[in-house]
Image (cartoon, grey):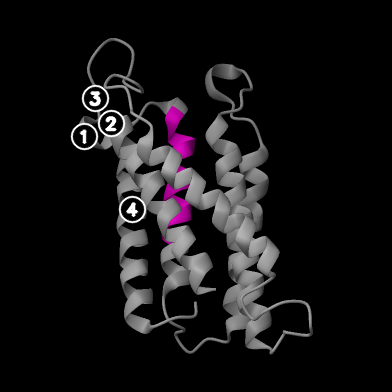
Amino acid sequence: MHGPPLTSLLLAALCAGVGGLCLLRMRAVAAGERRGAAEDALMGLGMAAMALPAAGLPEAWTAGAFAAVFGAAFVRALLPSRAAGHHRYHPHHLHHAVGALAMVYMAVAMGTADHGGHGGHGAAGGLPLVTGALLAYYLLYVLHGGLRPHAAGAGAPAGGGRTGGWTASPELAGACRVCLGTAMAAMLLAL
């Protein structure tokens, strides 16, 4: 990722911390919510890896690896979940699909910037229109998520009480998604 090394390290630390919390959350929530927590964890840990300053590997290699992983995550996000034996689609899957596409886009932009890929098709940071559209999406997502109240009992397992403690709380899920959306906006700005 482009930008000052300290900023990149701080962004990587934030994303890794959020990804770690999502992994903890994945173990604490009901089976129907695990997929969303796993997708959040993948996004956080992937963003942390992408935000790290170059580690001496050719950027085309790392860009190809990110594009492959998040291309597969995009396809997975579009598939309905098979909870309780029937197919259903959760609204967060579309958000995860957009996030996976944004990661593929940033990986491709980083890979072409490494090869001097201006070619009149856009800046080193990708196509300004696509970058702007993704940036607008994430800013609106963060504002909406930050202003939306989370019900105290939403997401709690049936039968009363939360078995997973604080890591299973819907407030934590919302906070993680707002953090990841903010980090994605920062990464798009640094592209």
Residue under circle 3? 163
* Residue 162 spot, x, y in % from top left: 24, 23
Left/right placement of residue 44 relative to residue 175 reads right
Left/right placement of residue 8 relative to residue 189 reads left
The three-letter amino acid code for the residue at tag 3 is Thr
Residue under circle 2? 169
The stretch of residues the image draws in magenta is 33-45
Residue under circle 1? 166
Magenta portion: prevailing SS class: helix
Label 4, label 2: how many angstroms apart (C-alpha)?
14 Å
Q: Residue at x 20, y 31 (%)?
A: 165
Nearest the viewer among 99 and 64 is 99
Label 3, label 2: how many angstroms apart (C-alpha)?
10 Å
Residue 64's quadrant in the figure?
A: bottom right
The three-letter amino acid code for the residue at tag 2 is Ser
Residue under circle 4? 18
Disc 2 is placed on an element classified as loop
Q: Are marks 1 and 2 in contact (CB under 8 Å)?
A: yes
